[in-house]
């Protein structure tokens, strides 16, 4: 089944293997995509679907060094290099919209931008900056009603720019402790207004963003990524997490989204997403369902055969194996990953991994 074609709403895919979003920090010039990034993604275009690295819809969301944005014309033009290159290889690609929220340092932000979050609590841990090295996260300013209205519009604008840039759709990143999950997560969101205080309140921003972007570009072009039980960036499980996420997906289902994408971080040491919750989320969504988290070819095939998902996403194997689809098909060995070049500028450890054909 992994190598079967699949119709992702209106988008035909050549197989059921998805390239997960992977931060690579190569947008060195004003957070604008470039020809090196186009080469990288084109090399991996045999994936049924590519989901790009996290891409900020706002200057305020550029929390990491050198991550790309999609909030101005120059960035859209840069991304057009990428989409053209992928489409020329017969691939499909969506852009993951990721506002980092409180997971940020001001040294990584452009002039005039600021660190925002649902509450004023500082994200634990440190953040790399090219200027100052590793630094504690900058304290966020609690978002007010105007900030929330602005960020919803920023997502809608980024979605429109994404289609202009040639993407087949977008993915809302509501996982891994970034802004949308900061609102979702009961350990992070300390608000007492209509955007917090209960599961319904914590779900509100995500639903409003989803409605805004679907109105802008059509629901068949909008996916969403969720990571209940993830622990990145000070999140973690909280009382009522299962019920809240099922309610969220039930509320998203009538919109007719492109897909729901659920990430299980247990392969990296986080608590596993309970099998029942995965099944309940799949049942709650009337549409394509993607699972990610520690899969290889054998376990991916099993998950599809047992109807746990329609598509399987893999991340790290794609870093070092641009021809991962063919390697899985042939049961060929995989290249070793070089973690030291995950986030460094330049081609080393990015576009220089060998394929089976050289």
Image: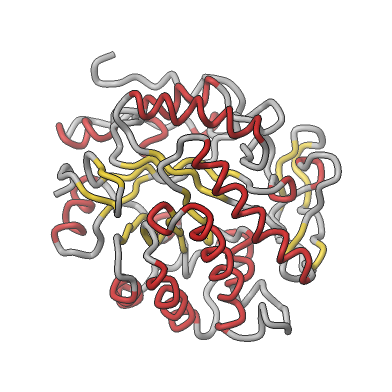
**Residue sitting at x 55%, y 79%:** 238
Residue 316 visible to an observer of this rendering: no
Residue found at the very far right of the displayed protein:
112
**Residue 29: x %, y % from top left:** 69, 26
Horizontal side of 10 relative to 245 (left or right) equals left
State the count of labels. 0
Residue 42 in view in this figure: yes
The location of residue 336, given as percent across then percent down, is 37, 30
In the image, residue 208 lies at what x, y percent? Answer: 58, 69
Figure check: 203 above or below 347: below
The residue lying at 63 percent from left, 33 percent from top is 75
Question: In the image, what residue occupies the spot 35% across and 28% down?
Answer: 322
User: Quadrant of residue 148 in the image?
Assistant: bottom right
Position of residue 238 in the picture relative to residue 282 (left or right): right
Give percent across and percent down for residue 27.
62, 30
User: Could you tell me which quadrant the C terminus lies in?
Assistant: top left
Determine the residue positioned at 24% across, 47% down: 16
How does the figure colour the protein chain or chains?
Answer: secondary structure
Q: Nearer the viewer, residue 236 or 6?
A: 6
Q: Is residue 240 above or below residue 8?
A: below
Q: Describe residue 126's horizontal placement relative to residue 313 as left or right.
A: right
Relative to 115, is 109 above or below? above
Residue 104 or residue 15, whichever sits in front = 15
Q: Residue 281 occupies which quadrant of the picture? A: bottom left
């Amino acid at each position: 089944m992994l190598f079967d074609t699949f119709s992702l709403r209106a988008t035909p895919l050549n197989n059921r293997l998805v390239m997960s979003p992977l931060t690579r920090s190569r947008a060195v010039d004003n957070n604008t995509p470039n020809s090196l990034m186009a080469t990288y993604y084109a090399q991996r275009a045999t994936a049924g679907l590519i989901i790009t690295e996290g891409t900020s819809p706002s200057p305020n969301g550029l929390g990491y060094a050198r991550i790309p944005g999609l909030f101005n014309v120059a960035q859209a033009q840069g991304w057009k290099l990428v989409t053209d290159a992928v489409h020329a290889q017969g691939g499909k690609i969506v852009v993951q919209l990721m506002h980092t929220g409180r997971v940020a340092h001001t040294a990584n932000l452009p002039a005039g931008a600021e660190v925002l979050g649902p509450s004023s609590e500082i994200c634990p841990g440190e953040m790399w900056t090219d200027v100052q090295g590793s630094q504690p996260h900058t304290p966020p300013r609690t978002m007010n009603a105007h900030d929330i209205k602005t960020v919803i519009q920023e997502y809608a604008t980024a979605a429109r720019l994404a289609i202009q840039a040639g993407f087949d759709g977008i993915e809302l990143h509501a996982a891994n402790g970034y802004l949308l999950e900061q609102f979702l997560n009961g350990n992070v969101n300390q608000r007492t207004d209509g955007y917090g205080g209960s599961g319904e309140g914590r779900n509100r921003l995500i639903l409003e963003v989803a409605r805004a972007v679907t109105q802008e570009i059509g629901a068949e072009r909008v996916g969403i990524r969720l990571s209940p039980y993830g622990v990145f960036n000070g999140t973690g499980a909280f009382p009522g997490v299962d019920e809240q996420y099922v309610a969220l997906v039930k509320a998203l289902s009538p919109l007719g989204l492109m897909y729901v994408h659920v990430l299980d971080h247990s392969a990296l040491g986080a608590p596993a997403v309970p099998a029942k919750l995965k099944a309940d989320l799949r049942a709650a969504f009337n549409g394509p369902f993607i699972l990610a988290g520690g899969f290889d070819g054998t376990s991916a095939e099993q998950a599809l055969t047992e109807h746990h998902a329609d598509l399987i996403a893999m991340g790290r194997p794609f870093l070092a194996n641009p021809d991962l689809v063919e390697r899985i098909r042939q049961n060929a060995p995989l290249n070793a990953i070089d973690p030291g070049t995950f986030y460094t500028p330049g081609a080393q450890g990015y576009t220089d991994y060998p394929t089976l054909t050289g």
